[in-house]
């Protein structure tokens, strides 16, 4: 097991290999200051609970509009272990049922469209967690307006609505939306034995340049139990992206990699140390060199004055008009002041350039993420839509998409359209990101041009001041033939220069102190970053058997689902997922569209089954699969997926629960009849 002293020793050895002379005591002090010793002491394995939904109840009132009377509705279905399926056409309400369960279990209703959300009045879900019975109840009022309220709680036992209304005491209570999310997060994190892990990111707001720490919650981990048609990339970290800190934390926690919390905390401290180092270095900038140059110039001028005073103390040296010396020295002083201002401008422009480069990097990452999302949305939006996704009325006009995109209003029911998780046509969003990137690149080019311009002005000014210095030296050498400055004026000038030198040396001492601060920040970051890399590698080596077992199970399931020529899957030390298909190494984004869907479903199923088959990990054994491969997967492979799900139901049904929704009717023929529900009369659930 990785102890604090072992981490200190390994960090010192790694730094010594790179000729970094940092003492063991300094390393120990820095890691203790960051609280790493305490985090390592707290790194203990916690329990793992199983989640099982027994019953779902949804009640509300469907609003038809056009003066028609509202239609009350209720939906209820009893569930149990194993596989449970909802099979119905698009718009039948499958996703609404599943997202209502997600709402009750996580506090997040983002999967329910705003229009449908205002129809729902009550949601009641009975579930067991670690063998204990609970009821999650949500009731809402306000008609879906911005002022609507959400209240409810989680209660011990399987309670009816009547029993809850009779003032049953909840184990977690909430009276508004934010409070609901916090209460449900705390409840499930504790019951499932999950711990919080942190990561850092810059704020997307341009006026907030600070680095912020973010923490995982139950809603974060719930990405592993709910895969929708637009979220198959969750947990599968692509080496082409080069990021995925949140997905990595979900994956490691559900695989039972408990020391990952230590690694994440050390990395957070290293990120903040790196930020402090960068800002300190930018602040000091080029001020030190500029002040040293001014000191050298003033020291030379003092020597010239001392030489001139020595000459004037000789009888043969005449004292004449000093206007020439005064004018030149004033010009030289103005040039030195100008040089100082230009140096400060250059430092500010270089800091601005660094910020713009970071903004470009963030914008390019955002564009990449949206482009990947658009690939999935393209598949959904390219389907032949025959019903309005809001009011479920028949759609037959060819220009429906263009009108909805331009007006943001459904042309059938005249209800406003809003996005959740940036749905719809993402091309304008991508264009906006590209426009932002282009604008930032123009600003970057302008900043670089301004820096070059300032440097050219600085060089010209330095040449002029140097020329004046040489002229003054020449005048001193000709002092015997007619010196032009009075003795008193020279003494005054000498005193002024010495005063300026004293002030500049004080400024230099302050910069030296700041330079020491920069060096200390660099050492702090180096120690923490090295410790993070060592701890990360140590944890990966310790849990490599878990990652390998997950990889083997993914290959097995993906091959059964119809991914051809899949020879291997590797999760490397950076937690990137690499595939070998037909002798070629690639990432999952390189697969054909239909293969990507099958691979991602296989990955999430493998993550759940790993705990059942091998006793590894902390997955709660609960998975929602919402409309997998509606259009991407051909009929033969879709049938294979359903047969394999039926086999999982037969073999592991007592140990897991899978909720499946699909619009493809052929699923009915290959799933056990007792687990399938279809809407009555082929209408709506």
Image (tube, helix red, strand yellow):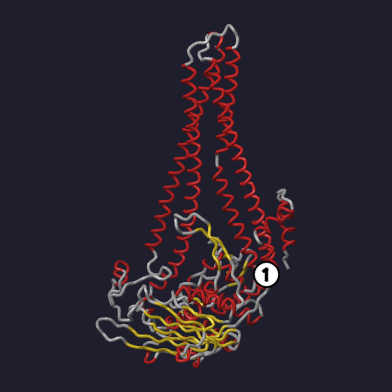
Is residue 584 visible in the rendered image? The answer is: no
Mark 1 lies on a secondary structure that is loop
In the rendered view, tell whether residue 536 sits above or below residue 466: below
564 relative to 356 in the view: left or right = right
Is residue 419 visible in the rendered image? The answer is: yes
| Badge count | 1
428 relative to 576 in the view: left or right = left
Could you say which is closer to the camera, residue 239 or residue 365?
A: 365
Residue 95's x, y, as percent? 43, 81
The residue furthest top is 316
- Residue at image coords 42%, 89%: 75
**Mark 1: few, some, or many residues within 10 Å (few <14, many ≥20)?**
some
Give the quarter of the figure containing the N terminus.
bottom right
- Residue at image coords 50%, 80%: 173
Could you say which is closer to the camera, residue 362 or residue 134?
A: 134
The residue furthest left is 67
- Residue at image coords 32%, 71%: 401
Residue behind mark 1: 43
In the rendered view, tell whether residue 114 sits above or below residue 437: below
Give the quarter of the figure containing the C terminus.
bottom left
The image quarter containing residue 399 is bottom left
Residue 614's x, y, as percent? 66, 80
319 relative to 408 in the view: left or right = right
The residue furthest bottom is 674
Residue 117's x, y, as percent? 39, 79
Residue 616's x, y, as percent? 66, 77
């Amino acid at each position: 097991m990785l102890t604090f002293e072992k981490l200190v020793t390994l960090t010192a050895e790694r730094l010594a290999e790179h000729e970094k002379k940092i003492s063991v005591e300094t390393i120990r002090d820095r890691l203790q200051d960051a609280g790493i010793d305490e985090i390592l002491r707290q790194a203990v394995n916690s329990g793992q609970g199983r989640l099982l939904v027994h019953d779902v109840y949804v009640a509300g009132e469907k609003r038809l509009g056009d003066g028609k009377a509202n239609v009350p509705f209720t939906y209820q279905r009893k569930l149990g272990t194993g596989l449970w399926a909802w099979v119905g056409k698009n718009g039948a309400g499958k996703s609404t049922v599943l997202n209502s369960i997600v709402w009750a279990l996580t506090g997040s209703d983002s999967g329910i469209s705003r229009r449908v959300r205002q129809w729902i009045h009550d949601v009641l879900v009975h579930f067991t967690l670690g063998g204990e019975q609970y009821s999650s109840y949500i009731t809402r009022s306000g008609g879906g307006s911005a002022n609507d309220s959400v209240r409810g709680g989680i209660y011990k036992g399987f309670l009816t609505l009547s029993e809850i209304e009779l003032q049953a005491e909840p184990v977690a209570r909430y009276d508004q939306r934010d409070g609901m999310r916090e209460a449900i997060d705390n409840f499930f994190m504790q019951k499932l034995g999950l711990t919080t892990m942190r990561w850092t990111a810059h704020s997307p707001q341009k006026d907030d340049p600070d680095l912020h720490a973010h923490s995982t919650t139950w809603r974060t981990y719930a990405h592993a139990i709910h895969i929708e048609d637009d979220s198959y990339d969750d947990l599968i970290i692509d080496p082409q992206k080069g990021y995925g800190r949140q997905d990595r934390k979900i994956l490691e926690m559900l695989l039972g990699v408990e020391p990952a919390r230590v690694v994440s905390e050390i990395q957070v401290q290293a990120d903040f140390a790196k930020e402090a180092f960068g800002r300190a270095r930018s602040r000091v900038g080029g001020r030190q060199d500029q002040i040293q140059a001014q000191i050298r110039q003033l020291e030379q001028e003092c020597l010239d004055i001392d030489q001139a005073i020595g000459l004037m103390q000789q009888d043969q040296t005449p004292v004449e008009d000093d206007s020439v010396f005064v004018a030149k020295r004033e010009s030289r002083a103005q040039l030195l002041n100008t040089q100082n201002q230009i140096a400060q401008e250059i430092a500010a422009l270089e800091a601005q350039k660094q910020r713009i480069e970071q903004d470009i990097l963030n914008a390019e990452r955002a564009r990449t993420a949206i482009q990947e999302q658009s690939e999935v949305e393209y598949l959904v939006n390219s389907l032949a839509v025959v019903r309005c996704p809001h009011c479920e009325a028949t759609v037959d006009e060819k220009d429906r998409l263009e009108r909805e995109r331009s007006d943001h209003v459904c042309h059938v029911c005249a209800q406003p359209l809003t996005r959740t998780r940036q749905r719809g046509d993402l091309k304008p969003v991508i264009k906006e990101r590209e426009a932002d990137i282009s604008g930032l690149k123009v600003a970057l080019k302008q900043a670089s041009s301004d820096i070059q311009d300032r440097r050219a002005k600085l060089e010209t000014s330095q040449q002029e001041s140097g020329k004046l210095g040489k002229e003054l030296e020449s005048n001193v050498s000709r002092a015997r033939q007619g010196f032009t400055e009075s003795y008193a004026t020279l003494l005054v000038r000498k005193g002024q220069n010495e005063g300026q030198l004293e002030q500049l040396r004080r400024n230099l001492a302050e910069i030296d102190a700041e330079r020491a601060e920069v060096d200390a920040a660099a050492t702090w970051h180096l120690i923490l970053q090295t410790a993070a890399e060592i701890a990360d590698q140590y944890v990966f080596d310790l849990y490599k058997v878990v990652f390998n077992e997950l990889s083997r199970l993914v290959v097995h399931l993906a091959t059964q689902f119809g991914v051809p020529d899949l020879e291997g899957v590797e999760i490397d030390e950076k937690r990137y997922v690499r595939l070998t298909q037909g002798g070629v190494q690639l990432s999952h984004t390189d697969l054909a569209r239909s293969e990507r869907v099958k691979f991602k479903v296989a990955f999430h199923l493998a993550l759940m089954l790993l705990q059942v088959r091998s006793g590894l990990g902390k997955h709660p054994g609960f998975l929602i699969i919402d409309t997998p491969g509606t259009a991407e997967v051909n009929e033969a492979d879709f049938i294979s997926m359903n047969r394999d799900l039926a086999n999982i139901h037969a073999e592991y049904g007592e140990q897991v629960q899978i909720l499946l929704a699909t619009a493809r009717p052929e699923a009915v023929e290959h799933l056990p009849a007792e687990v399938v529900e279809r809407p009555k009369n082929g209408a709506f659930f």
